[in-house]
Amino acid sequence: MAEQPASKSARILYVPVGLVSSIGGGIIAGQVFKQVWKRATPTHTDDPPSPLQSEYSWGQMLAAAAAQGVVFSLTKAIIQRSGAKAFQRVTGEWPGD
């Protein structure tokens, strides 16, 4: 079932909720990725390789970047959708579209 487009007031009211959920999502995603990286590479206790660390191969660096991108995207999407659903329950309007 398609949602009704949000009214202008609903979109304005959602701005602070969206900002908080985006910031919170980024922070949570960073923590989730650290845990995923620790479990994926139990022999390494360091942070994931960055593009400027020459001791890592291209494959290792790209794998770390891809894993980080996936974790960040999924975590932020889950948090933002949950925030939109909560906003809808409270106001009766979907904040997007």
Image (cartoon, rainbow, N blue to C red):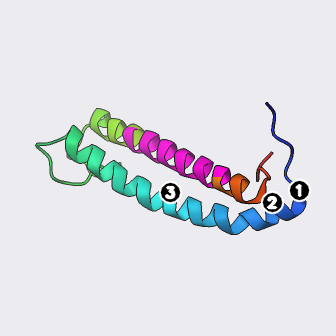
Residue 81 sits inside the magenta stretch:
yes
Disc assigned to residue 11:
2
Q: Which residue is mark 1?
A: 7
Q: Are marks 1 and 2 in contact (CB under 8 Å)?
A: yes
Q: Which mark is residue 25?
A: 3
Location of residue 1 in the rendering, given as x and y in whole percent from the top left corner = 79, 30
Task: Name the residue at the left extreme.
Answer: 43
Q: Nearer the viewer, mark 1 or mark 3?
A: 1
- Which quadrant would residue 19 be assigned to in this image? bottom right
Q: Residues within 10 Å of mark 1 (few under 14, many from 20)?
A: some
- Residue at image position (65%, 49%) is 85
Give residue 23's position: percent from left, percent from top. Answer: 53, 64
User: Residue 2 is drawn in which quadrant?
Assistant: top right
Q: Is there any visible trace of residue 52 in the rendered image?
A: no
- Residue 28 vertical position relative to residue 49 in the rendered view, above or below: below
Could you tell me residue 49's position as x and y percent? 28, 48
Regarding mark 1 in the picture, which secondary structure is present there? loop
Task: Please tell me which of labels 1 and 3 falls first in the chain.
Answer: 1
Q: Which residues are magenta?
A: 67-85
Near-viewer residue (5 or 73): 5
Residue 79 at what x, y percent from top left? 54, 51
Please name whichever residue, 72 or 53, is drawn nearer the observer in this view of the structure. 72
The magenta stretch spans residue 89: no
What is the C-alpha distance between the residues marked 1 and 2?
6 Å
